[in-house]
Amino acid sequence: MTATWLDFWQTENEFDESMSANYAYFLAHVETLVSLTSGTRVLDIGSGPGNLEDAWYNRVAELHGIDISERYNALARTKHADHSTVFFHDLPADDYLNFSVVAGRQFDLVIVMSVVQYYRNANEAMQLLANIKQLAAPGAKALICDLIVEEGVMGDVLSILGRSLRQGQLLTMLKLLFRLRFSDYYEVRKQNGILVIPESVWLAGCKRLGLNARFIAEPLTMQQERRNLLIEF
Ligand SMILES: C[S@@+](CC[C@H](N)C(=O)[O-])C[C@H]1O[C@@H](n2cnc3c(N)ncnc32)[C@H](O)[C@@H]1O
């Protein structure tokens, strides 16, 4: 039986296919907030199977995905073997805020999608902010997305169902939620919990680090309850 979040991401799981539906929603909306050019250097923290890289590999200068899951990195590397500007780096699972794999680089855009909820505590999220600050080029933007800022599973479920209905994806989403309920995800979440960090804690952390940050009003993911933090450097 899977026990930790790391084990979960290292093993074939229910998200492998469903993530791309959520990502498609993000991709359709994100360019109202950020602009891509052939010079843009992108860092994708928690890159998973490489959904961002699949969409942007020929639109930007460089894409660097970093993830604790060697399984996802291997999968993503295979897909992008012929793309010389796409890189996937392994993060140490027991030291995942050690970003030495990209040390010395500068990025114009940093994306963190559906990752922070798997951190252990809010201090780690504050370390993430400090890491991003270190890697951001002047004028860069960072989007930390799909943040859970309030307790309560029901709001999450209802919002994703409502949005799926409007997207014509209700049946797909119902099937996923049903599968999740009887899956390792449900068990791992029960055992390890999921991290909730209130908006006020995020904003206070940004202020301490001197970051210009705000939660954006428009949804960027199918789960409208989740919030998205934009940092401008
Ligand atoms: C829900 S998936 C999202 C993947 C991708 N960002 C997307 O939206 O398609 C969560 C990803 O975060 C990764 N992850 C979980 N905990 C992490 C951590 N502490 N540091 C970096 N990546 C992590 C998992 O391996 C997985 O690839």
Image (cartoon, rainbow, N blue to C red):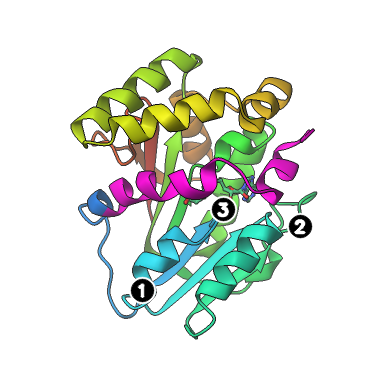
The percent coordinates of residue 153 (x first, y second) are 48, 17
Classify the position of the C terminus by image quarter: bottom left
Q: Main secondary structure of the magenta part?
A: helix
Residue 137 visible in the current orientation: no
Determine whether the beta carbon of the residue marked 2 sits less than 8 angstroms from the nearest atom of ligand 1: no
Image position of 211 (left or right of 195): left
At x 70%, y 50%, the residue is 10
Question: Where is mark 3, residue-wise?
Answer: 46
Residue ID at (26%, 30%): 163
Q: Crowding near pointer 1: few (<14 within 10 Å), some, many (20+)?
A: some
Q: Secondary structure at mark 3?
A: loop
20 with respect to 84 (left or right) = left
Q: Is residue 24 above or below residue 222?
A: below
Distance between the alpha carbons at the discs numbered 3 and 2: 12 Å
User: What's the residue at 41%, 61% (across, down)?
Assistant: 52
What residue did someone put label 1 on? 40
The mark that comes first in sequence, 1 or 2, is 1
**Image: 5 above or below 150:** below
